[in-house]
Each structure stands twice: as C-alpha cells, then as structure tokens.
Amino acid sequence: MFFVDSISQIADRIYDIWVRAPHVAHHAQAGQFAMFRIDEKGERIPLTISAVDRDSIRVVFLAVGKTTSQLAYLRTGDHIKDIAGPLGKPSVIRHYRTCVPVGGGVGAGSKGIERVIPQYYSTEVATWE
Ligand SMILES: Cc1cc2nc3c(=O)[nH]c(=O)nc-3n(C[C@H](O)[C@H](O)[C@H](O)COP(=O)(O)OP(=O)(O)OC[C@H]3O[C@@H](n4cnc5c(N)ncnc54)[C@H](O)[C@@H]3O)c2cc1C
C-alpha cells in the first residue's frame, strides 16, 4: 500500500499528487514513469514521475477516464494498492551548460533537471517551476 502525502487540483481536471513510494523514488530518473493500480479491481495505468522528494514521488495527471477520475478523488492519508516502477528508458542528460527540455502533454518528467520551465496544457494553463 502506498500512502498519499498530498493531492491538489492545479488547473481544470489537472491534479498534482505526491505519493510515498520509496522503491520508485530512490531509483527514478528523468523521463521515467510508474504503473498505478488504485485497488484490487483497478486497472493499471502509466503516469510519469514528475519529481522526487526523499521517499515520495510526484505525478501530475489529467482526469480523463475511469482510473484518473478515481485518482482525483483520493485525499491525503488514503492509500494506493500498487505502484510499480520506475519504468521506461530514462532521458539522456548530457553535461551542457544550459539545456532546454521540451515536452508535451501532462506531467512531462522533470526529475533530475535542475530548473523546470513551465509546461502548458492547451489554452488552460497549468504551470509550475
Ligand atoms: C508512459 C506514459 C506516461 C504517462 N504519463 C502521464 C502523466 O504523467 N499524466 C497524465 O495525465 N497522463 C499520463 N499518461 C496517460 C495516462 O496513462 C492515461 O490518461 C490514463 O491511462 C487514462 O486512464 P483512465 O482509466 O483514466 O481513462 P480511460 O477510461 O482508459 O480512457 C477514457 C478516455 O479518455 C481518452 N484519453 C486518455 N488519455 C487522454 C488524454 N491524455 N487526453 C485526452 N483524452 C485522453 C481515451 O482515449 C478514452 O477515450 C501517460 C501514458 C503513458 C503511456
């Protein structure tokens, strides 16, 4: 079981959730994702690891369908049944002085990148640094 540290709505249908998942947090690299299953009957969905803080990971998601809508109803202190990861090929970060990663969609991975330039989702803007 994975403890929900916090969840907040940051724009229309877009949520920012922090979940305690030490095994994922300690190994995650930029560009990777994790598979979430909310409960025993739930489907597994992939969500990008947006940031890491000690034992916890942040995911930013758009509530579009069944599982992401259920996720949006969770509150601090709730639990998620399974989180598997980190998965996927990490982004290659070379040692240039200044890099400008460009990503599309919701929750593009920023873990391992020092400064995050705001991301935009259509004309309804969801940004953070
Ligand atoms: C590697 C990977 C990483 C991902 N990371 C993220 C992430 O960080 N944040 C995030 O929000 N999503 C991310 N996604 C997409 C996310 O997995 C899906 O939105 C999720 O699986 C939908 O599940 P659901 O049960 O809520 O919707 P379902 O009930 O399965 O789908 C409902 C309907 O919504 C449509 N739909 C699904 N996704 C979108 C979308 N993004 N925009 C518009 N319509 C859509 C489907 O076509 C379907 O018709 C990622 C996907 C992959 C493959």
Image (cartoon, rainbow, N blue to C red):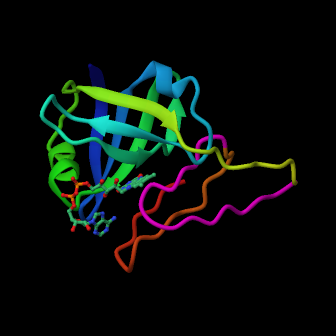
Q: Is residue 123 above or below residue 29?
A: below
Question: Relative to 3, is 26 on the left or the right?
Answer: right
Ligand 1 shown in quarter: bottom left
| Quadrant where the N terminus is found in the figure | top left
Residue 71 position, x and y percent, is 21, 43
Q: Is residue 78 above or below residue 97?
A: above
Find the residue positioned furthest to the bottom. Answer: 123
Q: Residue furthest right?
A: 96
Front-most of 43 and 17? Answer: 43
Left-right relation of 18 to 79: right
Would you identify the image quadrant in which residue 19 lies?
top left
Q: Position of residue 6 (x, y in %)?
A: 30, 34
Residue located at (52% from left, 22% from top): 54
Residue 53 placement (x, y as % from top left)? 51, 29
Region in magenta = 97-112
Q: Quadrant of residue 44?
A: top left
Residue 66 located within the stretch drawn in magenta: no
- The residue closer to the viewer here, 20 or 38, is 38
Identify the residue at image location x=40%, y=44%: 59
Chief SS of the magenta region: loop
- Residue occupying the point 52% across, 33% down: 52
